[in-house]
Image (cartoon, helix red, strand yellow):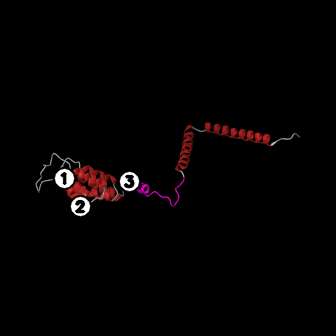
Amino acid sequence: MPATNFMDDLKHLVRHTTDTVQRHAQSAMYKMRALPPATRTKVGICAATVALFVGGLLLRGAAPAPGHTAPAFREEARATLADVRPPSRVAQRTYAVAKVEESQGSYKSAAENYAAAAKQGNARALNKLLAMTRAPKCEARSEAADALGTLRNKKARAALQKLAHGRFKDESRAPGIFSCSSRRAAEKALEKQRG
């Protein structure tokens, strides 16, 4: 009996394993070709989903050590998660009521409801309230300024400052005591936010 060495045994094992894998792969390919096109598409989609999931896990990387935290990043992440979360049903209902009131010209109650919805977590309500500060009517801008004065928000403060320095066609530069002035309302709202 001829003596064999380790390398010959290893070559034989690799060749045998490769042949077996190739036969199984060819068998799987023949079975895949025998499937209806819709089923092949579903299998392909599942395989792609699994590949994306595994790739996501690999790209995720190692978790930081328990003692090593980045508080600024965590605060930003919380802020973005708060923006992503859908508003509650109450906030959605309050937003819808405010939208109807605004369309009917009831600016005071619309602004109050937009502010309430914004406090309840509805980002669209805050955006609508900010948009009201650019409305063509002085009454809408003034009511929006009053409502923004109740919110402690950078966007609200910036909109109030812009409104306080703005000039509008429907307002005189020196408004009387009883005339509408969105600039005066914005200044009062800024004072309310400070104190």
- Measured as percent of width and height from the top left, residue 187 is found at 20, 56
Q: CA distance from mark 2 to mark 1?
A: 14 Å
For the residues carrying marks 2 and 3, which lies nearer the camera in this image? 2
Q: Are marks 2 and 3 in contact (CB under 8 Å)?
A: no
Q: Which residue is mark 2?
A: 192
Alpha carbon distance from label 1 to label 3:
30 Å
Mark 3 crowdedness (10 Å alpha carbons): few <14, some 14-19, many ≥20: few
Image coordinates of residue 62 in percent, x first then y, are 54, 53
Q: Earlier in the sequence, mark 2 or mark 3?
A: 3
Q: Residue at x 72, y 41 (%)?
A: 17
User: Residue 103 or 78: which is nearer the viewer?
Assistant: 78
In the shown orientation, is residue 34 left or right of residue 108?
A: right
Q: Which residue is mark 3?
A: 83
Q: Looking at the picture, does residue 71 appear above or below residue 45? A: below
Residue ranking furthest to the right: 1
Earlier residue among tags 2 and 1:
1
Mark drawn on residue 80: none
Q: Is residue 79 left or right of residue 172?
A: right
Q: Residue 106: in sight, yes or no?
A: no
Of callouts 1 and 3, which one flags the residue occurring earlier in the amino acid sequence?
3
The answer to which of 13 and 192 lies nearer the viewer is 192
What are the residue bounds of the magenta stretch?
A: 62-83
Quadrant assignment, res 42: top right
Query: Which numbered disc, 1 or 3, marks the residue closer to the eye?
Result: 1
Provide the residue designation for mark 1.
Answer: 183
Residue 190's quadrant in the figure? Answer: bottom left
Amino acid type, callout 1:
Arg
Within 10 angstroms of label 1, few (less than 14), some, or many (20 or more) residues? many
Mark 2 to mark 3: distance in Å?
Answer: 26 Å
Q: Is residue 89 above or below residue 40?
A: below
Is 81 part of what is drawn in magenta?
yes
